[in-house]
Image (spheres, rainbow, N blue to C red):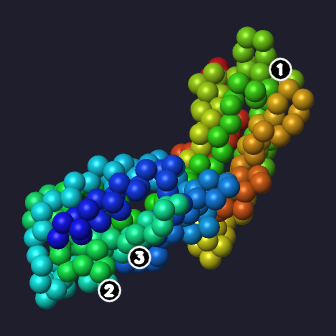
Amino acid sequence: GGDADSGVAEVLAGTMEQDLTSIRIEGGSEAITLLRDERGWRVNGFEADSAALDRLIAALGNTVVGPVVATNPNNHERMGVTADSAYVMTVSTAAGERTLLVGKSGRRFGTAYERLPDDDDVYLLEGDVRAQLGRDVDFWRDRTIVAIDTASVASVVVDHEGASYTLERGDTAWTFGGGGAVTASAVTGVLSELTAMMASGFLTETDSVAGAPQAAAVRALDADGALLAEVRFGAGEVDRWARAAGNDVLYRVSNFRVMRAAPERTAVEPES
């Protein structure tokens, strides 16, 4: 038991991010592989959400290994710690690879049963690990569509339902291209979206939302006219598709987000 206890603690102690090379989670609807490469963290080949990864690493690091609650393998199935019933988490570091079987929730809130694959002893873990392991792949993916420093934006070109207009940054205020006052709050909304535009989810080409025609777009340019960001949006009244220039990911966004990022011209014109 003591050796297994130290083995469990060793797996959890090895989850400092600087030591990790990958985390594989099996037992959910699909296998999840969080892998660090030269581009950063990826999940099943997609860019990973650093905040979600941070929460997992924090949950592993803060987990308390409690007492042995079962030693008889006949109890494994009831506690959900058999190989085909548990979440199987394999942690890889430079030092090697270790696996934990995380089973059902314990009787107390925030606890779960756990064992090492080669040990019959079942431990009670206290922490948020089990909740983190049950996420699907979309949860782990980065939902950032665009994120730019809007201080460098000199102009924004908006296309809404086929009608285009330009917003230009002046010395003291934004105006329409060629002159004309704009509503500052509407421009703030556009710039806020360009600072950090987040998707509500992801789409595949077969989703009905993905089949809608393009209905809007927003492009941000610097003072030299170089493109800083471009996002195109599909038509829709609730959910829409979005694509960012230089990125082949098909995002799902709310209609509210589109209307804020690429508003129709009348929404930017001051009230008369």
- Give the mark toward the camera: 3 or 1: 3
**In percent of the image, x 73 and y 11: which residue is there?**
172
Of all residues, the one furthest to the bottom in this rendering is 74
Which amino acid does the dot numbered 3 rest on? Answer: Glu
Q: Amino acid at mark 1?
A: Gly
Q: Which residue sits at x=59%, y=49%?
A: 144
Q: Vertical placement of 175 versus 245: above or below?
A: above
Which residue is label 1 attached to?
179
Q: CA distance from mark 3 to mark 2?
A: 9 Å
Q: Relative to residue 200, is residue 221 drawn left or right? A: right
Choose the circle earlier in sequence order: 2 or 1: 2
Front residue of 33 and 234: 33
Seen in the picture, residue 225 relative to 180 is either above or below; the reply is below
* Residue 25 image offset from top left, x and y in percent: 42, 71
Numbered-mark total: 3
The quarter of the picture where the N terminus appears is bottom left
Choose between 162 and 58: the one closer to the eye.
Answer: 58
x then y, percent, for residue 219: 77, 41
Amino acid beneath label 2: Asp
The answer for how far apart the CA atoms under marks 2 and 1 are is: 67 Å
**Is residue 155 found left or right of 71 in the rendered image?**
right
Tags 3 and 1 touching, CB below 8 Å: no
Q: Is residue 10 visible?
A: yes
Nearest the eye: 8 or 152: 8
Where's the C terminus, which quadrant?
A: top right
Gap between marks 3 and 1, in whole Å?
58 Å
Kindly identify which residue carries mark 2: 84
